[in-house]
Image (cartoon, rainbow, N blue to C red):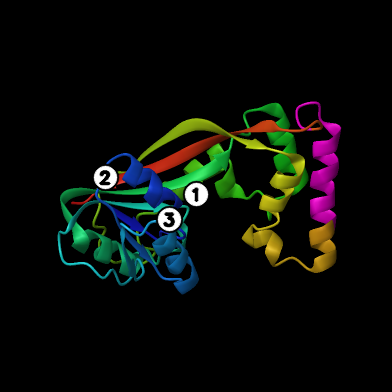
Amino acid sequence: MLDLGAGTGKLTATLVALGAEVIAVEPDPAMLTELRRSLPAVRALSGSAEAIPLPDASVDAVLAGNAMHWFDMAVAGPEIARVLAPSGILAGLWNVVDDRVEWVAGLARVSGSEAIGPRDTPTGWRAETADMHLPKTDVAARFGSPEQAEFPHGQRRTADSLVATIATRAGVLVMPEQEQEATLGRIRAFLASGPETARGEFTLPMLTGVLRVRRL
């Protein structure tokens, strides 16, 4: 398997634990250094979705954890198809909050779309990723019909740790300082006021959404 846009290796480590033979490719030097430090037995290469440093038909599956939305599929699509074996699988994975739970829906409303965006909840995720494997140009598609599935799980959190995570989201990081402080303040106040989240640790209900397509 190829973990494409592997970051610091969180998905890579999970795949290794499942017994897969994994190659990791990551463009950011700092993240790649951390991946190599934490997973020294994994073959970890510098590269990107648009320039994968592997030979043709060399992997059975390409996985992208919270990364596929950054790919330029007009270039990355043919490149991913090149390194996949015939009928190989491309799968994009995203972690989303489960806003079917009432208090999580309230958190999404209070946070605003810059902090919890359309790809961060199940309904929005399905709409945003249904054709993500396709190029935005007239380049021929290299993959078959998409399948989407969601797998429930949860993360143990405190109000402080959840606010700290939301503060790292791209939409929040680029806010003017005053707006950022106001947004995080609303989130803190919401968490402090809810019976599910006001006292100590709680479980944040989540789903892992998976988009899967097969190489033609």
Q: In this rendering, is residue 61 above or below 126?
A: below
Residue 33, how many percent across, how many down? 44, 68
Q: Nearer the viewer, residue 121 or 27?
A: 27
Q: Earlier in the sequence, mark 2 or mark 3?
A: 3
Alpha-carbon neighbours of circle 1 within 10 Å: few (<14), some, or many (≥20)? some
Mark 2: which amino acid? Answer: Ala
Residue hosting label 3: 9
Mark 1 → mark 2, Cα distance in angstroms: 29 Å
Q: Residue 152 in the image: x percent, y percent? A: 50, 30
User: Which numbered dot is residue 128?
Assistant: 1
Callout 2: helix, strand or loop?
A: loop
Answer with left or right where residue 47 lies relative to residue 122: left
Is 129 on the left-hand or right-hand side of 100? left
Spatial separation of the CA atoms under disc 2 and disc 3? 14 Å
The magenta segment is 182-197
Please rate how many residues cluster around mark 3, counting C-alpha atoms within 10 Å: few if below 14, some from 14 to 19, many from 20.
many
Image quarter of residue 202? top right
Of the pair 137 and 123, the residue shown nearer to us: 123
